[in-house]
Amino acid sequence: MIRNAIVAAALMLTAASAGAVDCRSVDFDGASYTVCEADASGADLRLFLRNGDGSIYGQFFAIDRDLATRGKKLLFAMNAGMYHEDRAPVGHYVENGVEEMRIIPNAGPGNFGLLPNGVLCLRDGRADVIETLSFVADDPGCRDATQSGPMLVIDGALHPKFLEDGTSKYIRNGVGTSADGRRIVFAISNEAVNFHSFGRLFRDALETDNALFLDGNISRLYAPGIGRNDFGFRLGPIVGVVGDAE
């Protein structure tokens, strides 16, 4: 745990010194990951799905191009939840206070329905991953929210259905937050991993209290600070950090 604490502390220190977001490679239990961390109390965190005319953004460059018209730029982005063929979100989705999709509290097919699942909730000055039933009970009033599943870490514990020797392995991405809502940590595996390994990354190496699986197989990352700009099929919901254009 001492090594894990050192890794987490180093990530926090570098993120604070970099300002909005810091990305780096992290090796954990024989697998390689790219981890990006921000201070949610100061970073401009947003969700993106549709542009001004209602069309789906779909790609990181489309968001960056739109932001440029307002003197802003995309500092970081990642796909942020599962979506249907038309790119509409599968679960709860709120952007800038406007709800596009209601909360889904019940179990269902696929990874999304592997309860407990959860919601990434963005409010001014904080970010929280919240288990879905707790979200329904507390009604936290998120400015932006995206629901996905399964939860990776719930109040410091791994999802109860994860198997250490699970054979389902994919490139996976997810997000974790600290209890005080200040740390938000995104991770994407650079090789195929199972849920148990991915959950342990967030719990043991990144030391986040709660963490949420965002997707697998289609997982993509935009991190120009480290020269990474993944491209592929059009995406649905996207989470990003916005900064001023230079």
Image (spheres, rainbow, N blue to C red):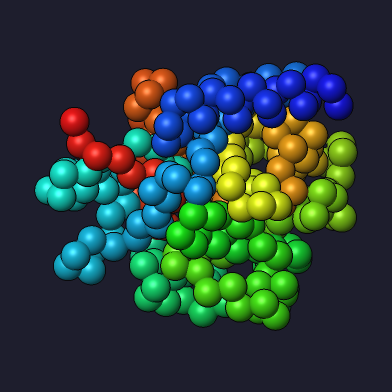
Residue placed most toward the observer, 40 or 105: 40
Residue 206 picture quarter: top right
Report the side of 195 relative to 45 (left or right).
right
Residue 32 screen position, x and y as percent? 64, 22
Report the side of 219 relative to 205 (left or right).
left
Residue 100 appears in the rendering: no
Residue placed most toward the observer, 103 or 126: 126
Q: Quadrant of the C terminus?
A: top left
Image point (66%, 72%), residue name? 135
Image point (28%, 54%), residue name? 57
Numbered marks: total: 0
Q: Quadrant of the N terminus?
A: top right
Q: Is residue 5 above or below residue 141?
A: above
Residue 134 picture quarter: bottom right
Q: Is residue 140 above or below residue 240?
A: below
Residue 5 picture quarter: top right
Image point (44%, 67%), residue name? 143
Residue 35 appears in the rendering: yes
Q: Is residue 47 above or below residue 32?
A: below
Residue 111 screen position, x and y as percent? 67, 58
Residue placed most toward the observer, 224 or 71: 71
Image point (39%, 54%), residue name? 46
Residue placed most toward the observer, 34 or 124: 124
Residue 81 screen position, x and y as percent? 52, 56
Residue 132 screen position, x and y as percent? 68, 70
Q: Is residue 226 above or below residue 132?
A: above
